[in-house]
Image (tube, helix red, strand yellow):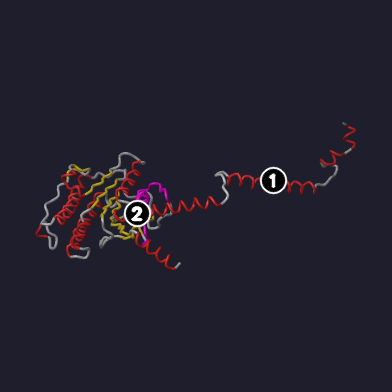
Amino acid sequence: MLKLLLCFVIALTAVEATGDFVVLHSPNSVLFNGNEEVEQSLLKEVFAAALGFTVKLRGVWNGICITDPFSLPEAIVAVVVEGVDSLDIPRGKRFPLNVNEVEETTWQAVRRRLEERGNNNTLVRISLADGVDALGLSALGELKPTPIDETSLRALSLRKDVDTKFLEEVQLLHAIAKKAPSAIKPDSKPDIYWFVISGLRPVFDAYGSNSTVSKEALSSLNNALNVIHDTFIQAYDGQVLIVAFTNDASKVHHIRSVTLERQKRDTSDTIDMRSIGKKYRTNYPVIFNIFLWFGIVFVFSLLAICITISKMDPGRDSIIYRMTSNRMKKDN
């Protein structure tokens, strides 16, 4: 029994995917506190609450608090870093993230939630790995990243494809920050800006997450996040929620397969248990409650009537006397 329990605990630890959810900026009307873990599938509810939308799943996470419903963010900026477990970001409020779905699934859920409220929202999702040639004219307009200054690099090298691809994504973030002030026109409709970075994981795989190259890559990413942070705060006059979170799709698929297998076993066990016990129709609880409470009310009502009649005074002015009086019968 002890070995079985130990194996179960090890299995749970092995399949749990953890990541980082970092709030880089939020207006005073939306506060993030505590350190409670949040599931990635619930981020759509977190974003909906921050924008003042109706939350479909209440009480599922206590890390967010709305202090002023009349001064909510006008936009949400999310930077998704794929393939890594954690982000070494010096600023912001960090929460453990349970990565239970892929990044695009989260984006589609957030996009649908905004489209339910209107069609004039600015909804921008840019996968930076596509590069300028694939992006063409983006929703923010034409992006023109500046050439990479090789002299500013210490460990990263433009002669290596892995390094170059990552640096191009970072330069695209800078280009987005440069284009945003002229492209963004705040209005009463909430906006979503969703930027996906895929080039950091290959750098970690090639050099190791603790290598000098990887540390410089993280530093470059943090610098780009700082520029994004300052630009969008200025564009929306501080009324913007800026977050960054990690997403490792390989772990998500592993968790999903394990979860589905566990659900199949639970379903089969439930069917076996139901076959043993007595079968009831779905409306059985309703009918049972109707008969139960009707019977209780009827019994107590009958008891009250009997007690009232037994205590009634059979005088000349009572209905009992009038109905049993011989004089009354003679008069009729």
- In the shown orientation, is residue 314 left or right of residue 129? right
Q: Nearer the viewer, residue 289 or 261?
A: 261
Q: Which residues are magenta?
A: 35-57
Q: CA distance from mark 2 to mark 1?
A: 53 Å
117 magenta-colored: no
Q: Amino acid at mark 1?
A: Phe
Q: Is residue 134 visible?
A: yes
Q: Quadrant of residue 137?
A: top left
The reply, left or right, for residue 241 in relation to residue 183 is right
Residue with the mark numbered 2: 100
**Residue drawn 18% across the image and 60% down it:** 206
Q: How many marks?
A: 2
The picture places residue 41, in percent across and down from the top left corner, at 36, 52
- In x, y percent, where is residue 170? 18, 54
Few, some or many residues within 10 Å of mark 1 (<14, 14–19, 20+): few
Residue 298's label in the rendered image is 1
Say whether residue 56 is magenta.
Answer: yes
* Dot placed on the residue nearer the N-terminal end, 2 or 1: 2
Which residue lies most toward the bottom here? 2
Looking at this view, is 90 or 104 the one in front? 104
Contact? badges 2 and 1 (CB < 8 Å): no
